[in-house]
Image: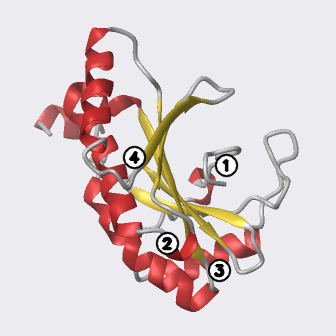
Amino acid sequence: MGILDSLLGRSRPKQPDLDALFQVPSAALTLLTELGMTPVGQGSVCYRAATGAGFDRAGDELRGLLALDPTLSVTTSVDAFGYTWTVVETGDGADSDVSTLCTALHTVNSALEAQGFGPGLLCTVVGFETSEGQRVGLVYLYKQGTFYPFAPVPGANAHDPRRDSVLELRMRDALAGELRLEKDLQRWLAVWDAPGL
């Protein structure tokens, strides 16, 4: 940052720390021991897709990289708001490998970033399930470099927006020593109908 930027009050945006995704397996153990939550074996990366040959080439490279691991299932979908979700699955519950999942999600983010599409990255969601069967997500905000919990009430969606705020706060408290959590609750955005939730 230059002197002129300092004088005018401009600041550089925070740089994402994609390596923070590698802290999720440790956080998963904490969620299991403290709250009885298990990983669902599914995670997803949400981004605004671009058009053109460059983006298509990046997608081809990404699929080629992920195809190297035969234990992964990778699909892509577009939600009602026009955002693209690359969904990675490794298995269910006890059979899921959170480390492999997080490595694959890191690969998706890194591949898009390396091809110049980082500004289109929005978030990464890793799915968990409570002992009662409620699905919750651990959300990584790409532009902030922080995590937050998202716990929709079963059956809730964008038209019926109910969240389990108590569970979200319990997750936040359990993970306070594990992850860099988003302190501004206004940024705890709802990711309704995210794959895995």
Instruction: Report the residue at 55% width, 59% height from top.
Output: 184
Q: Which residue bears the numbered disc 4?
A: 142
- 10 Å crowding of disc 3: few (<14), some (14-19), many (20+): some
Instruction: Note whether 12 is above or below 94 in the view shown.
Output: above
Q: CA distance from mark 2 to mark 4?
A: 28 Å
> The disc labelled 1 sits on which kind of residue?
Ala
Between disc 4 and disc 1, whose residue precedes? 4
Between disc 3 and disc 2, whose residue precedes? 2
The circle drawn on residue 95 is 2
At mark 4, the secondary structure is: loop
- 10 Å crowding of disc 1: few (<14), some (14-19), many (20+): some
At mark 3, the secondary structure is: helix
Question: Closer to the camera, 3 or 119?
Answer: 119
For the C terminus, give its image quadrant.
Answer: bottom right
- Check the image and name the residue furthest to the front: 70
Q: Which residue bears the numbered disc 3?
A: 170
Instruction: Report the residue at 29% width, 53% height from top.
Output: 18
The circle drawn on residue 190 is 1
Where residue 108 sits: x, y (%)? 33, 42
Instruction: Note whether 78 is above or below 66 in the view shown.
Output: above
* 11 to the left or right of 141: left
> The disc labelled 3 sits on which kind of residue?
Arg
- 10 Å crowding of disc 2: few (<14), some (14-19), many (20+): few
The circle drawn on residue 168 is none
> The disc labelled 4 sits on which kind of residue?
Tyr
Q: CA distance from mark 3 to mark 2?
A: 25 Å
Where residue 150 sits: x, y (%)? 64, 60
Instruction: Note whether 75 is above or below 92 in the view shown.
Output: above
